[in-house]
Each structure stands twice: as structure tokens, then as C-alpha cells.
Amino acid sequence: MDNKEMLFVDHLEELRKRIILTLAAFLLSLCGSFVYVQNIYAWLIRDLNHELAVLGPSEILWVYFMISGVVAIALTIPIAAHQIWLFVKPALSKKERKITLSYIPGLFILFITGLSFGYFVVYPTVLSFLLSLSEGQFQTMFTSEKYFKFIINLTLPFGFLFEIPLVVMFLTSLGVINPMFLSKARKLSYFLLVVVSILITPPDFMSDILVTVPLLILYECSVTLSKIVYRKKLKQSSDNVIKMKKTS
């Protein structure tokens, strides 16, 4: 019992260490992003034909922190993934360590790809559609806080959702899930993805469709990738069995 308690305490201490290092990386990234936040701000509003209003002296500071926070999250993702890998490393075999380590760059790349898709595809389409509804009817005026909240709400979720295929591949390689399970759960998954798309988009049909379709495609890509990983895993297992029979 004492040994078990000591092991549990050691695990908690190790987890605490990894969380502290991840938070430290996030704070450093946040500070670094804040240094260049005005340049990022200017780039984000470069094509905006409307002037942004500020309702209070602290609002622009809050906007700067929002922008810096998103940049810091993107920069922290590979570091957080590496810390998680270091935490679970002792429980993995040599082969599993190599496999899991190879996924870390992909997490960062897919997160940036998701942000780019949200910003360059979804955001301008949704914004132009919403502005067309007010054309000739209302005088449009944006506040900095609401404008950037609108951008973040449309882009940040895609950063995380675009990582679904890689997460599915990783879990399949570890044997946690398999393509048969994903195929059986397709209806429930579709329903959940539709709910997610409705929650993260403005309340109009076009925005929902624009977000739902890529999410469903991502899910089907995940199922296909899971099948590829699963077949490779089965082939390797059968090869190992044949080798063992030959040696015996």
C-alpha cells in the first residue's frame, strides 16, 4: 500500500511539473505575442471597410489580450503535446514512443490549418452574408471587442476540430479505438458535429452548412485514416506471429 501511495504521489508530482512547464510556455508565448500584437491587429483589420469603435479605455487592451491569447495557444500546442508525451512515455514501448512523438508536429500544422480555414474561408463568407442582410436597412458599426470575438468564435474552434483526424490515428495506433467503432458511431458523431457547428456559428442556415460540411468531411477522413492505421497494425501483428512461429 505504501509503495502504491508513493507511486501515486510521484505521478501527481510529475503531472504537476508538466502542467507548470506548459503554463510557463503559454505565459512566455503570451508575453512574446503581446510585443507584436499591434502588428497582428493591423494585419487582421487590413481589409475591413468599417472603422472599429472602442466603448471604453480598457476595451482595446482586452482585444490585444484576446489576439495574443490565440497566438499563444497556437505556439503552446506542440510544447503541451511534448509534455504529455513525456508524462506517458514511461508506460509506452519503444515503438509506441516513436509513433506518439511523430504526431506532435502534425498537431501544430493541423491547428494552424484549421485557423487558416476558419479565417480565410468561413469568416469572410459569413461576414459578407451578415453584412448583406443589413445593406440599405441599418448603419453598421463594429466595436473592437465584438468584432474580434466574432473572428475568434469562427476560427479558434476549427483549429481544434481539424486535429480530429490526427487524434483518431493516434488512438487507433494505441488500440483505444478502431474503424469499426467509428463506423458504428457515425450517426451519433454526425449529430454531435451538427450541434457543434450550430453552436459555434451565427444563427443562419448558410453559416451552419458552411461549417457542418467540412466537419463531416473531417470525420470521414478520420474513419479512412483509422482504417489505414488499423490495417497496418494488423499486418504487423500477423508478421510478428509468423516470425515467432519460424523462430520456434
Image (tube, grey):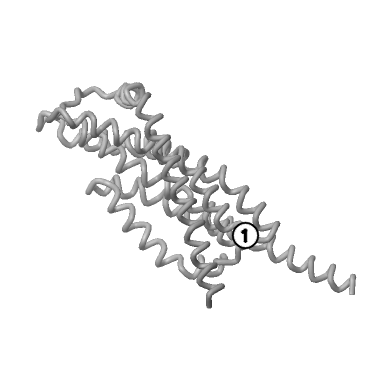
- Residue name at image x 51 percent, y 65 percent: 182
Between 12 and 151, the one lying in front of the other is 12
Q: From where the camera sits, is residue 224 visible? A: no
Does residue 109 appear left or right of residue 53 in this picture?
Answer: right
Q: Residue 91 location, x and y as percent?
A: 61, 63
Does residue 152 appear left or right of residue 52 in this picture?
Answer: right
Q: Residue 171 location, x and y as percent?
A: 55, 61
Between 203 and 80, the one lying in front of the other is 80
Between 1 and 101, the one lying in front of the other is 1
Q: Is residue 86 above or below residue 77?
A: below
Between 90 and 111, the one lying in front of the other is 90
- Residue name at image x 46 percent, y 37 percent: 75
Q: From where the camera sits, is residue 44 visible? A: yes
Q: Which residue has dot 1 on it?
A: 90
- Residue name at image x 33 percent, y 27 percent: 44
Q: Residue 194 location, x and y as percent?
A: 34, 57
Residue at the bottom extreme of this rendering: 1
**Within the image, what quadrant is residue 97 found in?**
bottom right
**Quadrant where the C terminus is found in the figure:** bottom right
Q: Residue 235 location, x and y as percent?
A: 73, 64
Does residue 214 appear left or right of residue 201 in this picture?
Answer: right
Circle 1: element type: helix
